[in-house]
Image: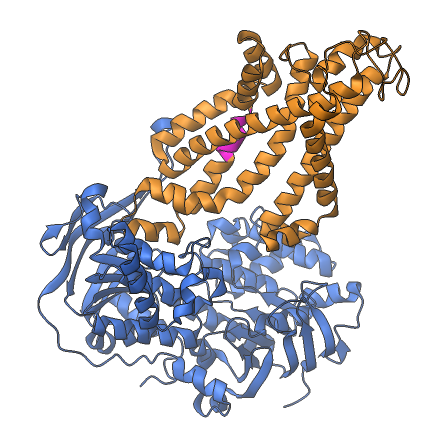
Amino acid sequence: MANFWRLFRRNRSAVAGLAILVMVILMAATAQLLYPADPFSLAGASMQPPGEGGFLLGSDSLGRDVAAGIAHGAKTSLLIGLLATIVAVGFGTVMGALAGYYGGWIDDLLMRTTEMFQTIPSFVFAILLVAIMKPSIHSIVIAIAVVSWPAVARLVRGEFLSLKNREFVQACHTLGMSDAKVILGEILPNCLSPIIVIGSLMVATAILIESGLAFLGLGDPNIMSWGFQIGAGRTLLRSAWWVCTFPGIAILVTVLAINLVGEGLNDALNPRLRERQ
Amino acid sequence: MSESLLEIRNLHICLPEGSERPYAVEAADLDLAPNEILCIVGESGSGKSLTARAVMGLLPKPHVRVVDGSIRLAGEDVNQVSEARLREIRGSEVSMIFQEPMTALNPVMTIGDQIDEVFRFHESMTRKDRRSRALDLLADVHLPDPDQIVRSYPHELSGGQRQRAMIAMALALDPKILIADEPTTALDVTTQAQILKLIKEMQAAHNTGVLFITHDFGVVADVADRVAVMQQGSVVETGTADEVLNAPKHPYTQALIAAVPSLAPRPPRDQSAEPALQVKGLNKVFRSGGGFLGFGGGGRTVQAAKDVTLDLKRGETLGIVGESGSGKSTVARCIVRLIDADDGQILLNGTDLRPLNRAEMRPHRASIQMVFQDPFASLNPRTRVGKIIAQGPLLRGTPLAEAQERARELLSIVGLDERAYDRFPHEFSGGQRQRIGIARALALNPEVLVADEPVSALDVSIQAQILLLLDEIREKMHLSMIFITHDLRVAAQVCDRIAVMRYGEIVETGATAEIFADPQAPYTKDLLAAVPGQNWRAA
């Protein structure tokens, strides 16, 4: 672990990314304390520019506090990003592991299924799924997970394909180890690194998809989110620039931070890539 | 010695910070005269390859670089010259052939185009002249049908043919020095013998000085005029081949030479007639290709084992010897049921193991265990050594404390410290890892041990220790052993009987001494004739 941190620290931008991410997480955690009121409630005069009328980042056409929206929206973005990633990585790992380990017709079946999902443009597919189910936090998480898992499945399958023929795995077969033990105890721990890396990058993608859905009005109507704020403010872009701009910056900074952390994890966990630098 | 082609003085090559030693090569002095083959011999990590690369200016800079000393090519210091001059030197004055011709050749260019490139970069010749020179070169290295070969891609040639093509390229501009970095290590013995002959022939025809890097003393005995022995980055001994091979002075050289297995077969031992394992009529065909869900036509088929019949007596070591692709590993993996044979019988204590499914096989697993070839791939890098060894007994319901006790005991049986128990595999050297692999196989008290090339990835001194260990435990634990190897010297040392395989078939079986003294099959004769260095220490 100490060794891992030493390697991670070598990538300066990853450390900066981690610092920003920690701040976003803190903001999400303290949103309730900083802005105890419902972010949807009217907080004062409408269309106030930043710094006026008691609004740090201004207010929108209905007099909602943009800063409060960003703080509460951080929680939504992180939560959805994380949940969707966990579901996608979990499902994708199972599919990829089974396909890679067993091969043959199981591999054919699972991979053709995966390809079917990959042929549909992922954002359009996500819109379709949310539109069919009612827009809610559950349906958004499911939609994002459904469009994200194929990438994980292919990655894990590739790792399993190369690891299952390694001699240490064969040695376990000669000891009479069961398939479940070989998959979970021997092969999976050896492909955790790439899974962690792809998972971390997937959180960023999930946040972007969620924002996109909310922007199109397909977000959970009861939950404040950055995409919703931008969507609500887009008609005012020329008269009240701050309504769209600050949530936009929040998305940009968060996604960038997560990507940097993901890159850092990649450098620290994949030693072969590290040597190249 | 007349004027020397290459003069290396006090060469120091540094390693990146945090490596196990500060210098890869330390204070090395070497000389190469025209028309001479100088062998640099050493075990892995001795710095022999880096020395050769330094001559070509091919070190992986900036972390590994020459920090002191000089490398003079006919008076010119390679470290002082410009990049442009260095490029001129490479190819026209010094050229190199590599261990693995498949990776050293560009897979998407024809052999002809690759030879053509050499001329285009260094000389102004017309296209027609270049092509005819290329054809001449290919004919010189005895490649059959040069017209065909110039139009071939590397993957269409065999390993030996690729190495010949590499040699043709290296000699294209008539360099003064040829550096050969383990040029025959990736080849089978029979091919190796041909390539060694070719290198000697080319060297004599072109008056080239050859710097020949190898770990194999048999090869040294066959090709070297002079020998330099490297240990841990230092040249510990130099001399004529005769001096170094037959009267080594430095203790390290003495130890290395003593570790080279002799070709004289081990004395026969008393045999019990009772069979431990019988293989009858084993067949295995590999099919590749075939498309989605079996559509898209049939693929290639390879008959990896064809009617293989073997008899392993209790307490004996049966060697299966063959070149790559002979099917020896396939047979081993069929016996331990890692792959399913198509038909035939594998009889262990009267039970036929072949038709058993995985669940039915499980109780028999303990009786047959395997030791693998690659000590780096055969241990899970994320599992502690103790757990790796205890795993087998634990799977069979042995209580934890007892399994741990047994694992510690096995560690000391295979000659490792008990403290190894809590460490991870990467903390051990190749030889130590192989010991761990052996301990794992022994943990289940097997009757039959199948060892698939257990020493071919190891340095010669470690190899001798592991062979000794295998012999000891076979005695101590009353094991019967199937020993797969491509190395006839190793086979002579450990095997009571030998089965020679080729193209999936057993061509000859017999007592080791008989096979060595009086081989019957023509292929066995070829194999024995190709063993490098037989005139040296033949007895």
Against B98, residue B14 (above or below) is below
**Magenta span: chief secondary structure:** helix
Would residue B291 be seen by someone viewing this image from the given angle? no
Q: Quadrant of residue B438?
A: bottom left
Residue A20 is inside the magenta segment = no
Q: Please identify the quadrant where the N terminus of chain B is shown.
A: bottom right
**Magenta residue span:** A148-154
Q: Colour of chain B?
A: blue
Would residue B472 be seen by someone viewing this image from the given angle? yes
Q: What colouring does the structure picture have?
A: by chain
Residue B96 lies, in percent from the top left, at: 61, 66
Chain identifier, orange in the render: A
B275 to the left or right of B55 = left
Residue A150 is inside the magenta segment = yes
Q: Please identify the quadrant where the C terminus of chain B is shown.
A: bottom left
Q: Quadrant of residue A52?
A: top right
Residue A174 lies, in percent from the top left, at: 28, 52
Could you say which is closer to the camera, residue B450 or residue A245?
A245
B224 to the left or right of B259 = right
Could you say which is closer to the camera, residue A174 or residue B301?
A174
Could you say which is closer to the camera, residue A70 or residue A53?
A53
Against B78, residue A234 (above or below) is above
Residue A17 lies, in percent from the top left, at: 72, 39
Residue B13 lies, in percent from the top left, at: 68, 73
